[in-house]
Image (tube, rainbow, N blue to C red):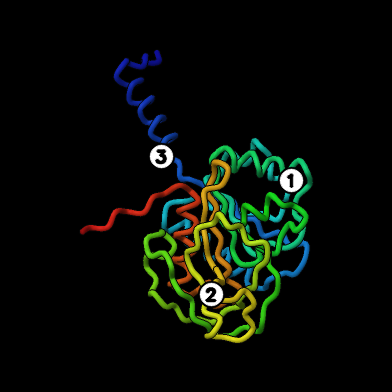
Amino acid sequence: MAKKLTAFTLLIFVFAAFSFCTSAKPRVLVMTKTAGFYHASIPKGVEAIQKLGAENGFDVDVTKDSSLFTDQNLKKYAAIIFLSTTGTLFNDDQKAAVQKYIRGGGGFVGIHAAADTEYGWPWYNKLVGAWFASHPKQQVAQLVVKDRKHLSTQHLPGIWERKDEWYNFKNINPDVKTLITIDEKSYEGGKNGDFHPMAWCHNFEGGRAFYTGLGHTDESFSEPLFLKHVLGGIQYAMGIKPKATKK
């Protein structure tokens, strides 16, 4: 005769089930769809974000499929990451789902060509923080870290010299918090003048958005300082707060 479960055994079973449910890792969705220029560094970027997730306690899904951007599916994600996306990605229903997700407290991360995306959607321009205008040839330049307290910048030197493709921007959202600027005197081809933001964040319509213009090259995604910069942006978008520094 089968033994009846005792109250104690049932309690252990319920506790184990509860622990399993509550220990699920947060999950992010990396969007890599391109309807314009395709960046050859995208696969390296995907690998790097997957590695960051494995090492820092979050799961990573990757897609080029806009149909996954629905109200129901986006509920699974602590953040959505647009990795060098380009052009028009979404139909009206999918745009509405992204808006609802952000307004419900979701997080957004834009990397490099995420600013070269959805030019016909003014709301997206406000979310990502600016649109791509042009860029000169790849070259070494000096970045100036303006905010050393943000998760994406607290590890960086005050002047960060590196090689990348440096975007000029248009339609910059004045409400974003600038984290990093670029010194146009340190390279050729800058067109934003004395104030040329290169990474920023903001609270936006109930959610959180982070953008970095860095990340064009394959080498970026094996560069420790850049990877930690991206990780901090993802953590910010997920709602993680920086640890208080000791006085």
- Three-letter residue code for mark 1: Ser
Q: Position of residue 14 (x, y in %)?
A: 38, 24
Q: Within 10 angstroms of label 3, few (less than 14), some, or many (20 or more) residues?
A: few
Residue underneath mark 1: 67
Q: Which mark is residue 220?
A: 2
Q: Earlier in the sequence, mark 1 or mark 2?
A: 1
Q: In the rendered image, which quarter contains the C terminus?
A: bottom left
Element assignment for label 3: loop
* Residue nearest the viewer, comparing 18 with 85: 85
Q: Position of residue 26 (x, y in %)?
A: 48, 45
Q: Earlier in the sequence, mark 3 or mark 2?
A: 3
Q: Is residue 131 above or below residue 91?
A: below
Q: In the rendered image, which quarter contains the N terminus?
A: top left
Determine the residue positioned at 45% across, 45% down: 25
Q: Position of residue 45 (x, y in %)?
A: 58, 67
Q: Is residue 58 above or below residue 164?
A: above
Determine the residue positioned at 55% across, 54% down: 175
* Residue nearest the viewer, comparing 191 with 156: 191
- Three-letter residue code for mark 3: Ser
Quarter where residue 87 is shown:
bottom right
Q: Which mark is residue 23?
A: 3
Q: CA distance from mark 3 to mark 2?
A: 32 Å
